[in-house]
Image (spheres, grey):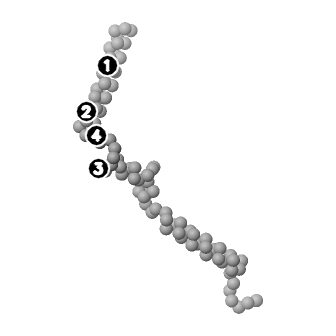
Amino acid sequence: MSTSAQVPGGPAAQMKRRNNAQRQEAKASQRPTSTRSVGAGGSSSTMLKLYTDESQGLKVDPVVVMVLSLGFIFSVVALHILAKVSTKLLG
């Protein structure tokens, strides 16, 4: 028996373990650490384009959005009333 402690598998196995550990460290350092950098359900750059003023996209004034949404709600209510009235008159 030798007096020095030898690694099981010899020097080739030790080199494989060292290379494997280095690869895992490199992979871990490349991984993003936060969910924002990963993207919540998608790319974070597309999420930011929705909320920044520099985005090249459809810019709609909040007043226009309010008018259109109130118009939609009014049309749905009017259609419900029209359906009630028509069923009472015809049926």
| Mark-to-mark CA distance, 4 and 3 | 12 Å
CB under 8 Å between discs 1 and 2: no
Tell me if I can see residue 8 in this picture. no
**Closer to the eye: label 1 or 2:** 2
Tell me if I can see residue 10 in this picture. yes
Above or below 56: residue 72: above
- Looking at the rendering, in which quadrant would you find the N terminus? bottom right
Q: Residue at x 31, y 29 (%)?
A: 72
| Mark-to-mark CA distance, 4 and 1 | 31 Å
- Looking at the rendering, in which quadrant would you find the C terminus? top left
Q: From the top left corner, tell me how far across and down residue 65 is, in percent.
A: 28, 36
Q: Identity of the amino acid at label 3?
A: Asp
Say left or right for 60 vs 10: left
Q: From the top left corner, tell me how far across and down residue 18 is, in percent.
A: 61, 75
- Dot 3 falls on a residue whose secondary structure is loop
Residue 53 circle label: 3
Residue that mark 2 sits on? 67
Residue that mark 1 sits on? 81
Residue that mark 4 sits on? 60
